[in-house]
Amino acid sequence: MYTSYISILCFLVDTGGTDGLLAQKTLEITNEVLSSYKNQGGYDMLGRTKDQIRTTEQVNGAMATCQALKLDALVIIGGVTSNTDAAQLAETFAEAKCATKVVGVPVTLNGDLKNQFVETTVGFDTICKVNSQLISNMCTDALSAEKYYYFIRMMGRKASHVALECALQSHPNMVILGEEVAASKLTIFDITKQICDAVQARAEKDKNHGVILIPEGLVESIPELYALLQEINGLHGKGVSVENISSQLSPWASALFEFLPQFIRQQLLLRPESDDSAQLSQIETEKLLAQLVETEMNKRLKEGTYKGKKFNAICHFFGYQARGAMPSKFDCDYAYVLGHVCYHILAAGLNGYMATVTNLKSPLNKWRCGAAPISSMMTVKGWSRGPATTQIGKPAVHMASVDLRGKAYEMLRQNSSSCLLEDIYRNPGPLQFEGPGADAKPISLCVEDQDYMGRIKKLQEYLEKVKSIVKPGCSQDVLKAALSAMSSVTETLAIMTSSSTGQPPL
Amino acid sequence: MYTSYISILCFLVDTGGTDGLLAQKTLEITNEVLSSYKNQGGYDMLGRTKDQIRTTEQVNGAMATCQALKLDALVIIGGVTSNTDAAQLAETFAEAKCATKVVGVPVTLNGDLKNQFVETTVGFDTICKVNSQLISNMCTDALSAEKYYYFIRMMGRKASHVALECALQSHPNMVILGEEVAASKLTIFDITKQICDAVQARAEKDKNHGVILIPEGLVESIPELYALLQEINGLHGKGVSVENISSQLSPWASALFEFLPQFIRQQLLLRPESDDSAQLSQIETEKLLAQLVETEMNKRLKEGTYKGKKFNAICHFFGYQARGAMPSKFDCDYAYVLGHVCYHILAAGLNGYMATVTNLKSPLNKWRCGAAPISSMMTVKGWSRGPATTQIGKPAVHMASVDLRGKAYEMLRQNSSSCLLEDIYRNPGPLQFEGPGADAKPISLCVEDQDYMGRIKKLQEYLEKVKSIVKPGCSQDVLKAALSAMSSVTETLAIMTSSSTGQPPL
């Protein structure tokens, strides 16, 4: 959770992330202070901590600060976790008659805060542009040397939005989305086999190089590794020390654990993050896969089923080096507009709202500003998260996975076999501030159906039109046709709504 | 050695690097073929191999191809190794009355082909710009999170030009140049202590984050590690298998080897490159240093001599991701001009020359095109390279180290203590093709005294001026003064020249 807290009305700011908020550290943001941070990347103006504002103690601490400093508002910038906390704070503040309003702003490089109101988050475009450039460079390099497979793990937490967008931008040979693996319940051996078969198919076309993208969340999408992580997480929760965890695993988890190479065992044993998920940035899934693939390819080479050159992999992790990057023009524009919306939300005296801008794929003058109650984005998930779970049933803004029925994923699949075999690498080039490409937006943003509120408005127009046609004085035939059609429509919608899972539509 | 071979006169090209040359693989470069590669990065149009053209067999093979294809010229693009081979080829071709002329072009990302004729190489600017951006992003990220030390190893082979330029561009807290370490004969423990003292000094200013650059060549600059690598190299040369090498090391080398962590031992045992140097890209010196620093900081923490937060390091290797990048405007211009110069060299019937452009820091219309015999850049080095050496005494174009008396290094040192303690990070931003920054050149290029040929010309002008003043008819006093002054000048220069080491002046 990366949070910063800006009281935009009184221009007083807490520094040092959540820790700073609780410790009442402040910085007055004057034009002069702001000038050297405008349109720059990073959270270095205010600092960032990975803490949370969730426990009663933390919430009360935050409220004490807001009251002591007489803040008009607390603006929370972050992803799903931060905005969940924002909603809870807003409710607590309101109950306690605290005058400070809480506003959320959708900012996270992972792109996993996505729903009917939020089309993308600030930072996602920049991170994808910087990483896509690097992936493309690797593709060119792979094609130049013709002897290496580059395994590249991408930052992005549990969901694979970053990997998907980067794949659409740069056309690597393969990308393995966590959502696909979870949906098909692929084991680590299935994935290894998929990659090996790809290497073999390419070798038959005399290609001994390639680029494979792996989202960092993949490890939690592989059923048996996820189950293992959950057991480890549970033992951490019981206070078992790291050295003793392996001896207390269940027999099947222990067998899997012992099978894994030493380096990954240590990484799986790391303490989980504040949101209970594994330390994904520290688990080198790309090295694990590269090693398993190498072993299998050597076996096939020995058996004579594979006749290509010796398999060589080089592993990379892309994430940190894009995180503090100068933001793209799109992200700058988006953030400026959101900031302005925040001001209006607070001027209107609203509490617990998120600033939103929709219709983002259209030109800037068609963007639609809005504000949505954070609670309207919250759902209750019933599924268990393993023995360590403490939050079942608590409403939260949940992470959005890559929609496997969405248009961006469809686009990826359409090109997947030519990407795999024909090296149709694409280089979007370095992020530009002027000239061609400077105004490019994320591909996955541009292909999706968006403007949810715009489409709701469109529907209302249809209903109005029916009303204006079918009014006293219209013919019996028209009334009959309208009644029959609308009865069928309402029945269909009623059935669809009753079978809905409560998941917000995308 | 990255070589590509273009016969620019007949537009016939060998593909697949050196292997392709020997196998007589060809590709006619038409405008159509070229159009999709113009101003792009990578060697994927022709392919690249890491081989060499050095043995009699290879040289004869190359000659056979040139004769069979009736090539007018063989253009060799590369760094010091490739151009050494080019010079040898030129001589052999001339002796054998082979009609093909050989021309060299200075292209290498390492920037280590540098002498009185070559101010920088094609690729160096791009690699430094792409990497500097990423380092700057890491600096911003370090400052945002305030809890990690990022150890970043930079590609660049044995010399530290890339690390120096990137440090001048992005102002990380520390950079450890191989040349400094070699000059001061620092051991791995000295370097560890330097870093630990820096961490401690920063902690006293309440800073628990930082960014440290490490050139990949550092490992060969540390005396005891270099000696160990030379022993391993020698045993490889004697055909000792990897498993048996550790048991055949001398007692002191064995003691050092056993002290090192497992991961680095495996990396040190890798077979050397074609130029006998270690596989620098595979040796994770940054991880070794991070581990040693962590151990020492934990010790200091326990003893109470260090009172800061627990030391946390995250390691990175930057190189592959910049190698195939879209070239900077400077590199595109430089490469176009060099290509044009090649044409003129060949039209003039010259053999064994390198295309050169000097006065590069001036605007493009002041660039000075030239051609220099590659042999004039070659020297014979007398020092031993350990038991595996086979080339002592053979003339070669040698790698240029960072000049510790040069202006670029002086600039780095001037800022080093404020960089270390004050976080004056600088972000040059992503490589731009238009707008501000698009015409930036390497800082290390711009601060050095250059235009060697221009300055020779200036000297000749002085001599001519003396000649024109001191001629029959001038006064006795003028003659006397001139004689005295010139006698003193010639004597000084004679003494300086006789004590010279044969090293080409920079």
Image (tube, coloured by chain):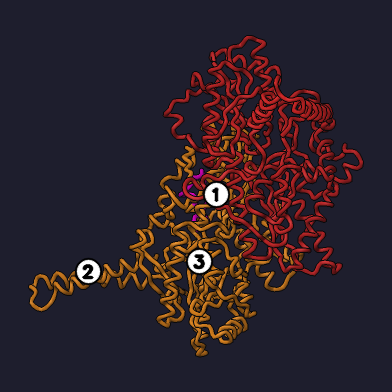
Chain colours: A red, B orange
Q: Are marks 3 and 1 in contact (CB under 8 Å)?
A: no
Q: Amino acid at mark 3?
A: Val
Label 1 sits on residue: B213
User: As rendered, which of B394 and B447 lies closer to the eye?
Assistant: B447
Q: Amino acid at mark 1?
A: Leu
| Magenta stretch encompasses residue B168 | yes
User: As rendered, which of A187 and B209 lies closer to the eye?
Assistant: A187
Question: Share a chain, discs 3 and 1?
Answer: yes
Q: Give the magenta range.
A: B166-182
Q: What subunit carries mark 3?
A: B
Residue B204 in percent (x, y) is at 53, 33
Question: Share a chain, discs 3 and 2?
Answer: yes
How many numbered marks, from 0 up? 3
Image quadrant where one finds the N terminus of chain B:
bottom right
Asked where in the image residue A144 lies, by quadrant, the reply is bottom right
Q: As displayed, is residue B301 above or below residue B65?
A: above
Q: Secondary structure at mark 2?
A: helix
| Magenta stretch encompasses residue A94 | no
Asked if residue A397 lies left or right of residue B194, the reply is: right
Q: What subunit carries mark 2?
A: B
Disc ID at residue B462: 2
Q: Earlier in the sequence, mark 3 or mark 2?
A: 3
User: As rendered, which of A100 and A225 lies closer to the eye?
Assistant: A100
